[in-house]
Amino acid sequence: MTEIKLRSYQTEAIDSVFKAWSEGVQRPAIVLPTGAGKTVVFSALVREFRNTYKHGQPDKGRRVMILAHRDELVDQAIAKLRALMPGVNVGKVKAQDRQTAADVMVCSVQTLSRDKPLQEMLDWAQDVGRIGLIITDECHHATATSYQKIYAAFPDALQLGVTATMIRGDGNGLGDQWEQVVYKRSILWMISKGFLTDVRTRQVDLKALDLSSVKRTFASKTTSAGDWQAGDLGRALMEAEADTAIARAYKEHAGDRQGIVFTPTVETAYAAAKALVDAGITASVVDGELPREMRQLVYDKYRQGKTQVLVNCMVLTEGFDMPQASCIVVARPTSSQGLYTQMVGRGLRPFPGKRDCLVLDLVGASATNRLRTLIDLEPGAVTALRPGESLAEAVVREEEEKNRKVPAGSLAFELRARDVDSFGSSGTEWIRTPKGVMFIECGAATRVFLWPSAESGMWDVCRVTEGEQWHRTEYTGLSIGEAMAWAEAVAEDHAGFSVQKSARWRKGKPSVAQMDMAYALVVDPTGMNKGQLSYAISKAVGAELFDPYVRG
């Protein structure tokens, strides 16, 4: 049996899943960034699952089904599983391959969701053993009808969802499918441990590109704001001569790097590739119509260094592993955090001699405030990137600045039960972090909060706006009741919306921006109205903002 040394976090992820199952969570999920080895994790987990649930034990079956939606994902999983478990029958269910009697099956969702293959799977389950576990790769797709049809056919099976991002582009929530994210590691954490490479960005300014005139697509009836429509965006990019701008920027900033260019349409992909070749840079296009054999030849040339740049129309966002890529060109401007993270993630894997990943972001003359950028890889961790600064460098700089901004005085909180009760009786929406810091969300990244006074048992009213220094107001050395009253008055003065619990806006439906932020913070928005989700998001952000400076 092949021995693969798991990284510590990979072992922790597997342990978290088994613990969740033992506690009655049937459908847990884990979130690990691109490059973290998700295929290794779930392959090792399959081996442990089959060793744990032996024949003859009263269980729900030892056979395992893995769902994937791209050819590359199917083949990657099969190769890893066969290496880990050489004595186990690992089969493929895709197109004409219908090995539905195998011990472990890697299945194309498009194939298995059809009636005939699905019935074959059910028939074999009666003869050779039940399906005990369903693993869904890239599980942010799981709310789609095709996935739900498969899940409904095996209602008793345990499940596991694996993804790099719990964010969908259509605004649909994932809480109904995945009960709990039981393990998560961030991109910054992976960078800090050396498991991913650092990343920096440069903007490629297309002054002729006017995104305000580009149509937006709405993927569901509940989506109030969508991403830019691919076809319309492609036409706007062609009119703005984005192809020549890409080639010029690549030659200037990434001449010695292998890279990947993401475009919105096949037309823009081929135009960009031609411009790169005309500039003396070897480039090939990968599009969805390229036969699998031809695609593998393109990949082989790239792997061997014979091709410097791969240009694709949204084919390589998932299931593509070429760690030598050290430049990502986002020639598909997007307002989707999930999509942006998937694109940039293709360049974050370490590789010998790779110092970092350079991201070239195409931006237009308008609507740039709605574009996703590098700081969206880790929402809330960095407020701004300085020119030439990497993501990790920005985090270090801002942490140092934040340490200098913390108000002086005791950092030990001691809120008594009666103090907490007084917060509940207030008409203002107070939020409490896990370590006890009480604050009011005022909008525009401003928060009014209570901080211990130098005098024991007394409180100061403080205010902080994102990117600015924390400071005490004139209301200091107060009892808890007085501090609350003055804090509420200060919050009303600075709030961009009503901070009252009874405010009508709290009863509305969550906005798309709220949903995106919730998924990024691993907050399950299922069943929440706008006010409830606002509270949950604010609590998560407040924990990161205040709790590191609390002792005890």
Image (cartoon, rainbow, N blue to C red):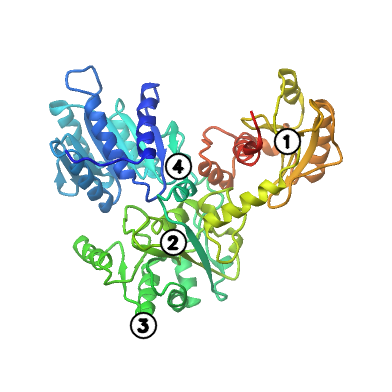
Q: Quadrant of residue 531?
A: top right
Is residue 400 found left or right of 180 in the rendered image? right
Which amino acid, by three-letter code, is at mark 1?
Answer: Ala
Q: Secondary structure at mark 1?
A: loop
Distance in Å between CA atoms under marks 2 and 1: 47 Å
Q: Which residue is mark 3?
A: 278
| Above or below: residue 356 compared with residue 421 | below
Q: Earlier in the sequence, mark 3 or mark 4?
A: 4
Give the number of the mark in front: 4 or 1: 4
Q: Residue at x 85, y 32 (%)?
A: 477
Query: Tag 3 or tag 2, which sits nearer the N-term?
Result: 3
Q: Secondary structure at mark 2?
A: loop
Query: Which residue is label 2 attached to?
Result: 356
Q: Which residue is mark 4?
A: 185
Q: CA distance from mark 3 to mark 4?
A: 41 Å
Q: Nearer the viewer, residue 83 or 515?
A: 83
Vertical placement of residue 364 versus 171, above or below: below
* First in residue order: circle 4 vs circle 2: 4
Q: Position of residue 150 (x, y in %)?
A: 29, 36
Residue at horizontal 16%, vertical 31%?
123
Question: Label 3 is placed on what type of residue?
Answer: Asp
Quadrant including the C terminus: top right
- Residue 272 seen in this snapshot: yes
Q: Are marks 2 and 3 in contact (CB under 8 Å)?
A: no
**Residue 221 x %, y %:** 51, 46
Dot 4 and dot 1 residues touching (CB under 8 Å): no
- Mark 4 → mark 2, Cα distance in angstroms: 20 Å
> To which quarter of the image does residue 534 belong?
top right
Counting residues from the N terminus, which is met first, the one under dot 2 or under dot 1?
A: 2
Q: Marks 2/3: CA distance?
A: 27 Å
